[in-house]
Amino acid sequence: MHGVVLQIAPILGAEKSKVPFYIAGGALVVWALIVSLGLGMRIPAFPRNAGEERGVIAVTVVLVLAAVSAAVLTSGTSATSPASTASATTPTATTGTPAPPSSPAGGASSAPLKLAANPEGQLSYEPKQLSAKTGKVTITMANMSVVEHNVTVAQGSTVLGAIPTFKGGVKTLTLNLKPGTYTFYCSVPGHRQAGMEGTLTVS
Ligand SMILES: [Cu+2]
């Protein structure tokens, strides 16, 4: 018995919002049957006078308005209930999808790799080792040195991209990289040889 009640309870809860429409619509149907079958067919002259006619029209108008407003209210409630169902399932979906599975897909939006040229004018980068996930890799380079520098990214002898030579600011380079080991260096003559190079590991 308890089991039955427990099974029905959610259904009643879900259907609750439509009950006013069923009642109003049902009343309208019953009234239409009364008027057409009960009165109209049994009393050929119906409505017999203006008072009856007005009464019939008044009751009909009230029932139609009740049914229409109930329908509008019901559709309004049922429109919000899928939304509330969706919002109820959203946290479940979020908790059901932990960070690890979403991070390979979000590899495209990895945080930029921060790189800086030595601000005191030494020919070196900080840091010398960078690592990123496969996909879009963004390198942000700050050069506050008085010496102009650039960042050139290469795999072996193949240059894949570069931030042009500049100073006094921050510039960004985005590359689409496959897993592997890359080198980054400054191609200003003498700088790489002086130590302006590092390794970028993509996994
Ligand atoms: Cu340089």
Image: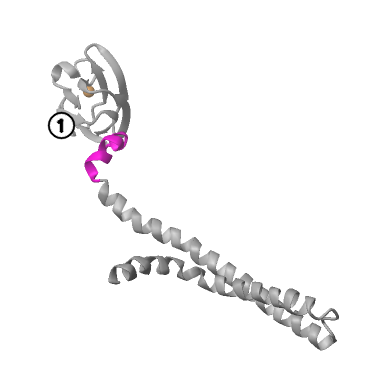
Q: Is residue 150 above or below residue 83?
A: above
Circle 1 is placed at which residue position? 127
Find the residue positioned furthest to the bottom: 51
- Label tally: 1
Q: Is residue 13 left or right of residue 106?
A: right
Q: Quadrant of residue 121?
A: top left
Q: Position of residue 145 (x, y in %)?
A: 22, 32
Q: Find residue 163 and report its horizontal and vertical position in percent.
A: 31, 25
Q: Is residue 102 magenta?
A: yes
Q: Which residues are magenta?
A: 98-110
Q: Which residue is more in the foreground, 32 or 54? A: 32
Q: Look at the picture and state if 51 lies above or below 136.
A: below
Residue at left 67%, top 73%? Answer: 64
Q: Nearer the viewer, residue 120 or 71?
A: 71
Q: Quadrant of ligand 1?
A: top left
Secondary structure of the residue carrying tag 1 is loop
